[in-house]
Image (cartoon, helix red, strand yellow):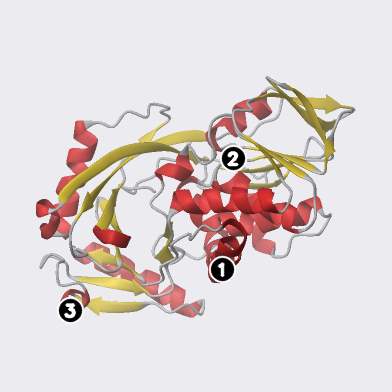
Amino acid sequence: MTRKYDAIIVGGGVIGSSIAYHMAARGLKVALLERERLGGQASSAAAGMLGAQAEISEPGPLFELSRRSRSLFPELAIRLRELSGIDIGLERKGLLRVATTEQEMNSLLHTIEFQRGAGEQADWLSGNEVRRLEPGLSPDILGAMLAEGDGHVLAPELSLAFAKAAAVLGADIREYSEVQSLVLEQGAVSGVRTRDGTLYGERVVMAAGTWSGPLLAQAGLACPIYPVQGECFSVLSHAPLVKATIFGHGCYLVPKKGGRLIVGATMNEHSYDRKVTAGGIGGLLAAAIRLLPGIAAAEWESAWSGLRPQTADGLPFIGGHQDLLHVYVAAGHYRNGILLSPITGQLAADWAEGKAAEGDYLEAFRLDRPLPKTERVNQDEFAH
């Protein structure tokens, strides 16, 4: 007998796993399909920052979506631990976005002004005030924006916790189940074809990151997403080198438990190459030493890379497809996949239940929005 699901989710990273969890929590019968291991792509490479304020310097839909999603993490961390037994390592010790030039300082002061106007807490700290909080930082730092509401999680643990919690709630989790094409019937999607056979569902959610676009293209649907390869490394120290996450020119520093510090990340657009290069890591290390001289004496742990899914305008695709019924796309989150995973899961579950999404700003993430003719070149020198 052919089993039919309420929803089939393609992609077992943090976005797909969050969608599976949120749908299963509402009693829907779902299948989560991952072509390799759960969370084995961008989700496993991410530093786990929740930078709703430190990341975004202008008002707009991404800021609204990000801070709404950030607010969900405290309750989510408790619920995921109850269901999956996994601690996602939520830390809310704030983020410091540091300035080493007058131009950077003026930009941060502008960011603080708009964020305060939006009701968020954001403070300017002088260089001396920054070093009182973080004595190891460089004397070259002129000041920093302190975003106390931002924080970080353990990215691989978050992705796995979503998937395991979904399984506890009844979701069918299938690793090494590569989707080859969509099943189309009378202008609607009715399932997916995999190497192991065909699965049928009332709805299909595309959450396969950089691989979402090619799968949809097979059905004649446009969803332009391209990869941005990023390299990271980690070091160890007996005592933590910093307490807060540090954003600076050329790198970011994310402290984890046990004296581990993650440093990232390079950017290589339109590349599926996951090699870790000496030049990439060397540049990151030099930038990190400029911000935190003591890192030079830390013990080397490891280096890795991941592929972040990006779109031409820098905003993810979140919503039902305009040309094909019963298919939903949640992809292109770039360096905010971890941060946006809770709200994306909620929005997809709302869609599956036929509920209207709340918030005019969500129109900005529609699949049929106008996009730049040429793909955006991100001027930031780091990604996560």
Q: Give the residue type at disc 2.
A: Gly
Dot 1, how many residues are within 10 Å of its Cα: few (below 14), some (14-19), or many (20+)?
A: some
Q: Is residue 106 above or below residue 210?
A: below
Q: Amino acid at mark 1?
A: Ile
- Looking at marks 1 and 3 on the same chain, the residue that comes earlier in the sequence is marked by 1
Q: Is residue 373 visible?
A: no
Q: Mark 1 or mark 2, which is nearer to you?
A: 1
* C-alpha separation, residue under disc 1 versus residue under disc 3: 33 Å
Give the residue pinned by disc 2. Answer: 12
Q: Which mark is residue 5?
A: none
> Tag 3 or tag 2, which sits nearer the N-term?
2
Instruction: Quadrant for residue 48, please give it.
Output: bottom left
Residue 104 in which image quadrant: bottom left
Q: What secondary structure is found at the residue carrying circle 2?
A: loop
Task: Name the residue carrying label 3.
Answer: 132
Label 1 vs label 3, nearer the camera: 1
* Mark 2 neighbour density, 10 Å: few (under 14) some (14–19) many (20 or more): many
Q: Amino acid at mark 3?
A: Arg
Labels 1 and 2: the sequence-earlier one: 2
Tell whether 127 sits left or right of 60. left
Tag in front: 2 or 3? 2
Label 1: which residue?
Answer: 78
Q: CA distance from mark 1 to mark 2?
A: 22 Å
CA gap between label 2 and label 3 equals 42 Å
